[in-house]
Amino acid sequence: MCNQNGFTLWFTGLSGAGKSTISEIVSEELRRRGLLVEVLDGDVVRTHLSKGLGFSKEDRDTNIRRIGWVCEILSRNGVAAIGAAISPYREIRDEIRGRIERFVEVYVECSIEKLTERDVKGLYQKALNGEIKHFTGVSDPYEPPLTPEVICHTDGRETPEQSAAKVLAKLEAMQYIPAT
Amino acid sequence: MCNQNGFTLWFTGLSGAGKSTISEIVSEELRRRGLLVEVLDGDVVRTHLSKGLGFSKEDRDTNIRRIGWVCEILSRNGVAAIGAAISPYREIRDEIRGRIERFVEVYVECSIEKLTERDVKGLYQKALNGEIKHFTGVSDPYEPPLTPEVICHTDGRETPEQSAAKVLAKLEAMQYIPAT
């Protein structure tokens, strides 16, 4: 029997904005506090649940719905489920929000200019050169959340630790995790 | 924080053999005993995780691997995960067994003759007439488990309640659930 109340923490934002980095820090801290945590990273999930899907709107939607469905099952069984995927379309994110009782959306916000400047994996340059098609933010749309529970500014204004602290503070304020 | 130890209960067998019926009785009893339970029914999962997949060996394997992956995540987070899908191929079932620490395989055994005789949904007759292709047991292989933890005989020798009781007794004997 379990007395943890599950919830879903949903990170959305452009490639390279810091979703995985922040979600890792948050998940470690949640585990340190004794919670059951499962991170569903967009790239990892693509290998397990969505092999064969591409990057058309339809395939992206399917992939995000699948992550959402697994988050939903985990949440209702007491787990802190963390989704970290670009999830560019507002409608699909809101659809998932509507299905999950305790849903916290974190917008990891960084400008295209800053991301192109950093370009850790060289993907933005390739997208700008047309070598990668359907690249979110360059040649494919990204619809930012209108009322996310948390916004993390990862353009240099906040360190990943500061962003993670904002997320944890919000979870405490919503009483989804006990205050320290 | 959770003090339930998760496990996966995997029902395999032909269409109409009674996997869903027995797994429903078992899951209700587990919930009654206070456990967290999630049933992953093959048909339901196809709509959420495997839309677009067909019934070729490759597609069946992919579908079963996805159910297995969700069972794995649930199990390691303290949930009693119940998979109920034909899962005709031994190799894939054993692959899933190898990934999950506490895995209990239930072979729901009923002869083709008996299933054709009952044929509740009329599927066997259609398969025998060639109207449904790739129908497990008729025009597609089914590989029974060699050493399942439980065998339920649903050809009339056992009622669904008796089959469920065998499964529960095995879970108690393995100390995956407390004895009543």
Image: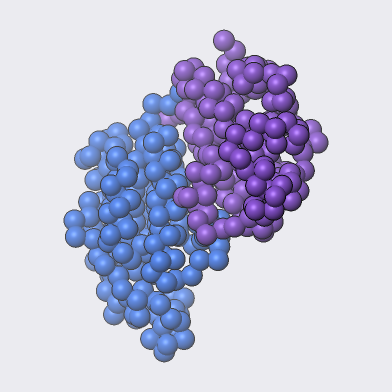
Chain colours: A purple, B blue
Residue A56 in the figure: left or right of residue B111:
right
Rendered image quadrant of residue A152: top right
Q: Which image quadrant: the C terminus of chain A?
A: top right
Residue B118 in the figure: left or right of residue A30:
left
Where B7 sits versus B63, above or below?
Answer: above
Q: Which image quadrant: the N terminus of chain A?
A: top left
Rendered image quadrant of residue A90: top right
Residue closest to the far right: A146
Where A81 sits versus B46, above or below?
Answer: above
Q: Nearer the viewer, residue A133 or B91?
A: A133
Where A148 sits versus A90, above or below?
Answer: above
Across and down, in percent, residue B30 comes to 39, 42
Residue closest to the far top: A180
Across and down, in percent, residue B166 comes to 26, 51
Rendered image quadrant of residue A96: top right
Q: Is residue B34 visible?
A: no
Q: Is residue B102 visible?
A: yes
- The structure residue drawn at horizontal position 56% and vertical position 58%, both measured from the top left corner, is A53
Across and down, in percent, residue B98 comes to 28, 47
Across and down, in percent, residue B124 comes to 40, 80
